[in-house]
Image (cartoon, rainbow, N blue to C red):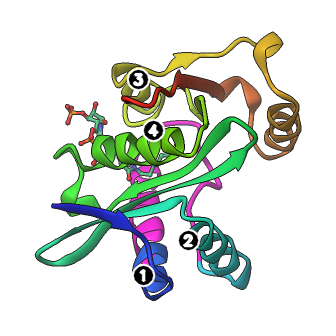
Amino acid sequence: MECRPARASDLDRIIETDIAASQLYAAAPYDTLGIAASRSPELEAFYLARIAEGLCLVAEGGNGVCGFAAGIAHGADLFLCEVNVMPDHQKRGIGTMLIDRLCQVAAGSGMTRVVLSTFTRPPWNAPFYRRIGFADMARKDYAGWMERLYEFECRRFDISTRVFMSRPLSRTA
Ligand SMILES: CC(C)(COP(=O)(O)OP(=O)(O)OC[C@H]1O[C@@H](n2cnc3c(N)ncnc32)[C@H](O)[C@@H]1OP(=O)(O)O)[C@@H](O)C(=O)NCCC(=O)NCCS
């Protein structure tokens, strides 16, 4: 399995992966209604921007791209905004590999912390991230850009089902 920077030509497969992976929530008994992804011009533009910024990596095997991770730089913070793996490739370490490699890219450009927001209960959300070194954040530690995201999430979700998490980045990560 190779991990490489995404290209604009990966866009269709990235969106297919996003939509397919989001089905994991539909089948699960958690408070994650409304999370299913769908294709739109906004989503296409969103991923093309991440690709252009060099903060989108894909995992590629014999059958092509099967996963990706994407981030947004906020000063010294990398916001890990998306990580998705095709359902038939999940639970083989690909998600962990993509996150670690994106963290290496961010550390290499001088960023010092990776932050994400996720659901508390599904085992592939907060419990998974805790296992790979992320820690829950207290509101007092939110940066300004996180406060804006928090306000957005308050409108979109039952905020008690969400958690912000972070992991330090080091150049040797
Ligand atoms: C999160 C995601 C990218 C992880 O990708 P992955 O390649 O399966 O990741 P890994 O194999 O490195 O580790 C997955 C861990 O998550 C948990 N997990 C994943 N799928 C699970 C499932 N269906 N049921 C229970 N636990 C699950 C397990 O702890 C698993 O570790 P294990 O295989 O050692 O038990 C993938 O589950 C996915 O695409 N989910 C849907 C989209 C999503 O939730 N994105 C993140 C939003 S914050």
Q: Which residue is mark 2?
A: 51
Q: Which mark is residue 127?
A: 3
> Quadrant of the rendered structure where residue 114 is?
top right
Report the residue at 65% width, 55% height from top. 34
Asked whether disc 1 touches disc 2, contact meaning CB atoms under 8 Å apart, the reply is yes
Q: Tag 3: residue type?
A: Pro
Where ligand 1 lies, by image quadrant? top left
Measured as percent of width and height from the top left, residue 127 is found at: 41, 23
Q: Is residue 80 above or below residue 11?
A: above
Q: Is residue 142 above or below residue 8?
A: above
Q: Which mark is residue 10?
A: 1
Measured as percent of width and height from the top left, residue 152 is found at: 85, 44
Q: How far, Cα to Cα, is label 1 from label 4?
A: 32 Å
Q: How far, Cα to Cα, is label 2 from label 3?
A: 28 Å
Residue 94 shown left or right of residue 158 in the figure: left
Q: Earlier in the sequence, mark 2 or mark 3?
A: 2
Q: Tag 2: residue type?
A: Ile
Measured as percent of width and height from the top left, residue 147 is found at: 86, 31
Q: Which residue is mark 4?
A: 29
Report the residue at 56% width, 61% height from top. 36
Measured as percent of width and height from the top left, residue 9 is found at: 44, 88
Q: Earlier in the sequence, mark 1 or mark 2?
A: 1
Q: How far, Cα to Cα, is label 1 from label 2?
A: 9 Å
Which mark's residue is nearer the viewer, 3 or 1? Answer: 1
The region drawn magenta spans 16-38
Q: Earlier in the sequence, mark 3 or mark 1?
A: 1
Q: Tell me the SS state at disc 4.
A: loop
Q: Earlier in the sequence, mark 4 or mark 2?
A: 4
